[in-house]
Amino acid sequence: MTFTIDNYTLNVTDFNESSEPVGAEWHTWENERITLKQYIYGVLRRWTLRCVEVNIPWNNSAAKYLQDKMRMGEKVVFGISEGSMHQFEGAQCYVERVEVSYGRGSTQNKFRREFTVTLKSAYPQ
C-alpha cells in the first residue's frame, strides 16, 4: 500500500484503522419503558501507522514534520492508495500522537528510526 501525509510517502510496516460514531444520545420514556435514542452526525476515524525511516536526517524526517504539525495544531492531508483493495485519499486529519524510537536495526552505516503516528479525522465522515 502507498501511504502519504502531505508531501511525505511513508514506509509503513503496520497499519490500524478504527471508527466511532459522532452524535448525541439521550434517554426517553416510550411504551412504558426507558429507551435510548441516538442521532448520528457521522463517523470519526483514527489511523495508527508504524513507520520506518532509514538514513533520513532529522530535519527531513516525516516524524519531525508530524511533531511540528501536532505542536502547531495544523491539519495534514492523509491518503491510502492500493487500487481496488483499499482507497482513501484527501482526508483532512489532526496528528494526535507521535512516538519515535531509535537504534533497533541501526548499524555503523545505516541509521534506522521507527515512529508511530496516530491521526484523527478533522471532520466526521
Image (cartoon, helix red, strand yellow):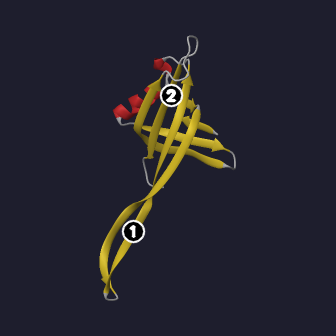
Of the residues shown, which amino acid type is indicated by label 2? Glu
Mark 1 residue type: Tyr
- In the image, residue 20 sits, relative to residue 87, either above or below, namely below
Tell me if I can see residue 18 in this picture: yes
User: Which quadrant holds the N terminus?
Assistant: top right
Crowdedness near tag 2: few (<14), some (14–19) or many (≥20) residues, C-alpha within 10 Å: many
Instruction: Determine which of the numbered discs, if any, sits on residue 110 in the image.
Output: none
**Residue sitting at x 42%, y 62%:** 41
Q: Which residue is mark 1?
A: 39
> Compared to 57, does 85 lie above or below?
below
Task: State the image quarter where residue 27 is shown.
Answer: bottom left
* Residue depth check, mark 1 versus mark 2: number of the one nearer the observer: 2
Residue drawn where x is 49% and y is 42% of the image: 48
**Residue extending furthest toward the top:** 108
Q: Position of residue 70 (x, y in %)?
A: 38, 34
* Among numbered discs 1 and 2, the one appearing first in the sequence: 1
For residue 96, side relative to residue 8 (left or right): left
Task: Note whether 59 is above or below 65 in the view shown.
Answer: above
Mark 1 crowdedness (10 Å alpha carbons): few <14, some 14-19, many ≥20: few
Residue 114's label in the rendered image is 2
Disc 1 and disc 2: Cα gap in Å? Answer: 40 Å
Question: How many numbered marks have been drawn onto this rendered protein structure?
Answer: 2
User: Looking at the image, which is closer to me, 106 or 22?
Assistant: 106
Could you tell me which secondary element the residue under label 2 belongs to?
A: strand
Residue 23 location (% of width, % of height): 38, 63
Secondary structure at badge 1 equals strand
Q: Residue at x 42, y 47 (%)?
A: 122
